Image (tube, rainbow, N blue to C red):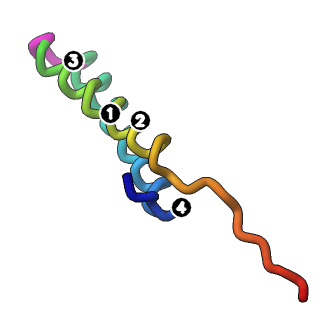
Amino acid sequence: MKSLTKRKTIALLCSGIFIISIAQLVAHFSLINDFVKGAALGVGIGVLVIALISGNFKTQTKSSN
């Protein structure tokens, strides 16, 4: 799988957390089907896993030649 840039990795992490939090808020304040709640949580967790597996967390250092 192709490695993601650091910026895209952070964006995916934020989106996954946002999806999970929105699913929890909607489930708390309204009646939704368990399937919909589980699907939203699954998508959020899936986005987080993709970000963690294919993300680039290495810091770039300048070489002093």
Q: Residue at x 28, y 24 (%)?
A: 41
Horizontal placement of 47 versus 39: left or right? right
Q: Secondary structure at mark 4?
A: helix
Q: Position of residue 13 (x, y in %)?
A: 45, 45
Crowdedness near tag 1: few (<14), some (14–19) or many (≥20) residues, C-alpha within 10 Å: few
- Which disc is residue 6 wearing? 4
Magenta residues (range): 29-34
Q: Position of residue 60 (x, y in %)?
A: 71, 69
Horizontal placement of 45 versus 31: left or right? right
- Which disc is residue 38 wearing? 3
Q: CA distance from mark 2 to mark 1?
A: 5 Å
- Which disc is residue 49 wearing? 2
Horizontal placement of 16 versus 29: left or right? right
Q: Amino acid at mark 2?
A: Val
Q: Amino acid at mark 4?
A: Lys
Residue 23 occupies which quadrant of the picture? top left
Q: CA distance from mark 2 to mark 4?
A: 15 Å
The residue singled out by tag 1 in the image is 46
Q: Position of residue 17 (x, y in %)?
A: 41, 37
> Do the numbered discs 2 and 1 sit on residues whose CB atoms are within 8 Å?
yes
Magenta stretch: residue 30 in it?
yes
Decide which of tag 3 and tag 4 comes sooner along the chain.
4
Q: Secondary structure at mark 3?
A: helix
Decide which of tag 2 and tag 3 comes sooner along the chain.
3
Q: Residue at x 13, y 21 (%)?
A: 36
- Residue located farthest toward the top when viewing the structure as drawn: 34
Q: Position of residue 18 (x, y in %)?
A: 37, 40
> Do the numbered discs 2 and 3 sit on residues whose CB atoms are within 8 Å?
no
Q: Amino acid at mark 3?
A: Gly
Q: Secondary structure at mark 1?
A: helix
Q: CA distance from mark 2 to mark 3?
A: 16 Å
Observer-nearest residue: 50 or 13?
A: 50
